[in-house]
Amino acid sequence: MPDFEYHAVDAAGGSAHGMLAAPSENDASAQLAQRGLFPLRIHPQGAAGAKGGGLDGRRAKRGGRRRVRAREMAVFIRQLATLLKAGLPLVRALETLARQERNSALREMMTALAADIRAGLPLSEALARRGQRFDRLQVNLVKAGEAAGALEAVLDRLAGFMEKSLALRGKLKAALVYPACILTVAAAIMVALLVFVVPRFRQIFADLLKGAPLPPLTRAVIAVSDAVSAHFVLLAATGVVLGFAFRWLARTARGRRWRDLGVLHLPLVGDLVLKSLVARCVRTLATLLASGVPILPALAIARDACGNERVAAALDTVRARVTEGSGLAGPVEDAGVFPPLVTSMIDVGEHTGQLPEMLGRVAEIYEGEVDVAAAGLGALLEPLLIVVLAAIVGTIVLALFLPIIRIVQLLS
């Protein structure tokens, strides 16, 4: 039986680190859950977590003949909560959903969950055994719901969280994909003109102008065309190498920090990304606290769910301050990442004893701001990119027509 090294926290926020023997990383996670520990990282002894696995292996290959999408998982959680609210026992609810599910991988997962629960395992532990499909947020929410005797309410809250997260992610992607597509098309058109069109016109000009000087703009475009045509393979190879180098760098801790910090400082896009990160982190924290998860494990889970190293480092600092006995509002303000509204609402929530409610309102505010910012970004970038594309193509076309005007003058 292999040995696994783990890093975890308990309900009081204390750190735990050690070794345990388990058949798999999912079983190791389940053992930690039985001890009352919230796992942060689990990896085979000596692997140093480089490749990740279990709860950290979110990119691991998914079992089954079909991939289980996040939206399908959200629908499953919502349907399970609905059946439990209707009074169906958990095992029967899972078996009912499995019979009507078309996705074979999701159906097999439901059947396996039902078998584990029939064997006496709680739902949270059955989910922890499948860490490649269920993250720590989902497992700990379900565990808190089981402890409070409100599993259906927690599942309903979890389904709402997943649906809002998917909607937020979709809006952010929609706002960023369109500009990327336009820039890609512009680059392809420019390369096609420089490599295939401009050289043909150059030969025509040489035949008809009989050595007469070309306009400066035309000479500049032809020079660029010659450089691109002569070194096209080298330029393409350089682009591929830079792409792979960027991907490799983004897999390192320092590279991720540089990338995530750079994204937050991008013009136009940086503010939208920051608002989406704030909405995701605050929504995660609100959902965890409302479901009964203690503040320190909730901060650790929100740190992993934020998806940005800069924000994650800020949450690490906040959690360290809270562990020392500080309130939440002061460390959040000192972190220097979160907008003042977040700090103000957290302060109000701490003084009124309604911290989860205040965090939920902050999440709704920033989710609304992401909607507005995404729509505004699209409205701003669409004409801007069209102007850029027109300027690039127009410059090349103008450079080709200036000699034609000269040729017409000579012929007439």
Image: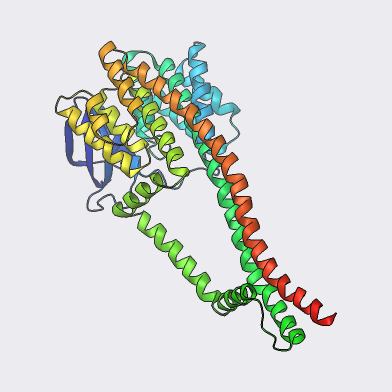
Quarter of the image for residue 319 reads top left
Whether residue 326 sits left or right of residue 412 in the image: it is left
Q: Give the residue displayed 45% in from the left and 46% down from the top.
A: 267
| In the depicted structure, whether residue 231 falls above or below residue 261 | below
Q: Which residue appears at 77% of the width and 84% of the height?
A: 208
> Vertical placement of 233 versus 40: above or below?
below
**Residue 106: in sight, yes or no?**
no
Residue 37 position within the rendered picture, expressed as x and y whole percent measured from the top left: 23, 30
- Position in image of residue 5 (x %, y %): 22, 44
Residue 109 visible at all: yes
What is the x, y in percent for residue 359? 36, 22
In the displayed image of the protein, which residue is found farthest to the bottom?
210
Q: Residue at x 67, y 78 (%)?
A: 199
Residue 326 lies in quadrant: top left
Q: Which residue lies at the image location 47% right of the left edge and 43% below the top edge?
A: 269
> x and y percent of residue 103 in the render?
58, 36
